[in-house]
Image (tube, coloured by chain):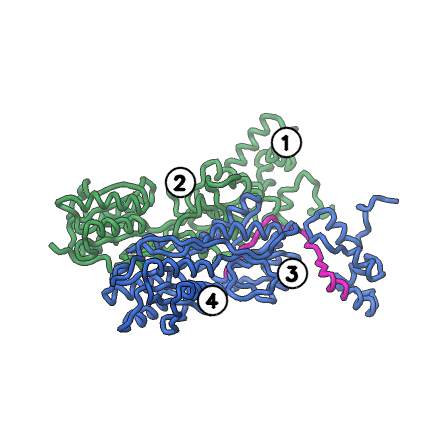
Chain colours: A green, B blue
Amino acid sequence: MPDNRSATPSTEEPDERGARGDGPAAVTIAYIAESAGVSVPTVSKVLNGRSGVSDDTRARVEELIHRYGYRKPPKSRSNLVELVFRELESMWAVEIIRGVERAARRNRVGVLVSEFGLQGTPARTIDDTVGRRPQCVLSVAQLSEDERDQLKAKGIPFVVFDPNEDLPDDVPFVGATNWRGGQAATRHLIELGHRRIAMISGPDHPFCLARLAGYSSALAEAGLPVEPDLVVKTLLTREDGHKAARDLLSRPDRPSAVFTANDMQALGVYQAARELGLSIPADLSVVGFDDVPAVSWVDPPLTTVHQPLAEMAVAATELALALGRGEDVPQVGLEIATTLTVRESTAPPKD
Amino acid sequence: MPDNRSATPSTEEPDERGARGDGPAAVTIAYIAESAGVSVPTVSKVLNGRSGVSDDTRARVEELIHRYGYRKPPKSRSNLVELVFRELESMWAVEIIRGVERAARRNRVGVLVSEFGLQGTPARTIDDTVGRRPQCVLSVAQLSEDERDQLKAKGIPFVVFDPNEDLPDDVPFVGATNWRGGQAATRHLIELGHRRIAMISGPDHPFCLARLAGYSSALAEAGLPVEPDLVVKTLLTREDGHKAARDLLSRPDRPSAVFTANDMQALGVYQAARELGLSIPADLSVVGFDDVPAVSWVDPPLTTVHQPLAEMAVAATELALALGRGEDVPQVGLEIATTLTVRESTAPPKD
């Protein structure tokens, strides 16, 4: 009986996999063949889209492949993680890259940074990513369902960083405790004595909705009403924060405090307050969200909810690498705790 | 006579090289063999440190290898550029990454981002970089002579981004026109009517010295003296800028304008001015250097010398890739022009 390793070409998948041991541990091609009552080469033909299999058999094998969630192990993997951005714009991209790089360094893998953005041609696509055969993919913002399917088909695990849309339950993600952050920011203002607290919120992404819900919950627990005219939804930019604040602060019954969905909006509130001759925090308290480096340098330094980007990036990288090693990961989604950083933009109201 | 391409294994280098055509164009192993009066396999043995060559012959071949600057072509290169940071701290890292990524995308290569920093173990080293076989390396800040030698030995071309020490003439680099930038900033203040202009400068890196020299040149061309007590050398941080400004601005004959070697120092000047009750620009004009995103959001928005980081990153990437393709590059060092961005922190002096 010859050594098993000198297998025939048609059994390349299980053999390759056994040799490397980096695929998911549960289902093998042999197991699928046995369950379907066919040979390993037949399953291989179905997996590789080759002919020579009856329609019935193909359907039965495909059903089992789907049921068991079998993934063809990649031909070979490069010693890299790929970090995908839609656009490398944000102030906090460097924090994320730094966290990923540190976790990757600990695991002795390299970090590829890609921008899928629309600017500049040719655009990078998920095909390029697949072609580079990374151990895993970390995606800042969204992967489309198509892109996720392509990665799945190639057995490349991925983790979504700070998702901005609702994802199916089986999509691994790492985010921040946005609801708790919104609650902490609003509680802080309530504890200072504020009663008319406005919120400049963002688009209907889950993280914005969670921050807004945290604001509402804190008001509710203090017995304060959520006044719809004190909640403005706008974009997460300084310009839009400025416009929303101009409106809120020009009213006769203006709020004494504003909580914003991110720091850029808060900087827009600063600008509006300056233009209107309002002093922060004497006339107006402001709380932001994110704690990007710049907000500790502005005058006054901004009280804000600290989003632990570096820790989130480390956790996401470790999770993605564990999935890449085929480890049995106890949880595929997690939120890292935010903390309130109190600086000088908040004070009791004048009344 | 058989086709040259079906060469014997011992001539693998020139053959590989001819097939790929990505090595430096000048010297081949065959040429060295001919010059030394030995066979190609003999040169190959010397190059690969194998035995079977007399000491005399080895010495002669090594001398020729050295004299002609022959480099063994790399075994194979990954389709990547590697961007090396000492530390991923700076505000402008994301601008650089973005520029490199866009140029790399146009050239259809991936971007690896590495941090060599001392924090976190194990540290990445040049060995890791060499092992990943990138097409070329872009180094932000410095590569040691040892690191440069290792890359050279492996035939991996590199470009130093914004060098902070003097480099040998043959080291490719991309920087900014720091001297012209310092001159433009100072001229702007002189044109506004300032006569007592201080400079908060940085450590003795070439880019800081060039900014300081630009300041001196602008004063000289206006017939103004460089007053040594108006020039402070300190670190490129907000804290050190703050400390230096506290000192400069507390004097009875305080300057009416300050030019700083970078934006962080300028933000420190803002802080000192606030503490001393000085209004910018009414009591004090301030000009920074770099134009990081945050300085347009502070109050008042900072007048600063714009360093074209994204353009520098694109140029550095294109240069490194061209070197990687073995192209004959006309110049291996270049400075991209800075521009003065006038915002609201500069105005004519009071009296």
Q: Which residue is found at the position 45% from the left and 36% from the top? A: A145
Instruction: Based on the picture, tell me whether residue B69 belongs to the magenta stretch.
Output: yes
**Residue found farthest to the right:** B1
Taking the view exactly as shown, the residue that stands out farthest to the left is: A351
Are tags 2 and 3 found on a single chain? no
Asked if labels 3 and 1 share a chain, the reply is: no
Q: Which mark is residue B209?
A: 4
Task: Give the Cα separation between the discs numbered 4 and 2.
Answer: 53 Å
Q: Which residues are magenta?
A: B63-85
Q: Which mark is residue B152?
A: 3
Question: Comparing marks 4 and 3, which lies closer to the viewer?
Answer: 4
Q: Amino acid at mark 4?
A: Leu
In the rendered image, the quadrant that contains the C terminus of chain B is bottom left
Q: Which residue carries the number 1 mark?
A: A50
Which three-letter amino acid code belongs to the residue tagged 1? Arg
**Residue of label 2:** A167
Q: Residues within 10 Å of mark 4 (few under 14, many from 20)?
A: some
Q: Residue at x 57, y 49 (%)?
A: B318
Q: Position of residue B192 (x, y in %)?
A: 32, 58
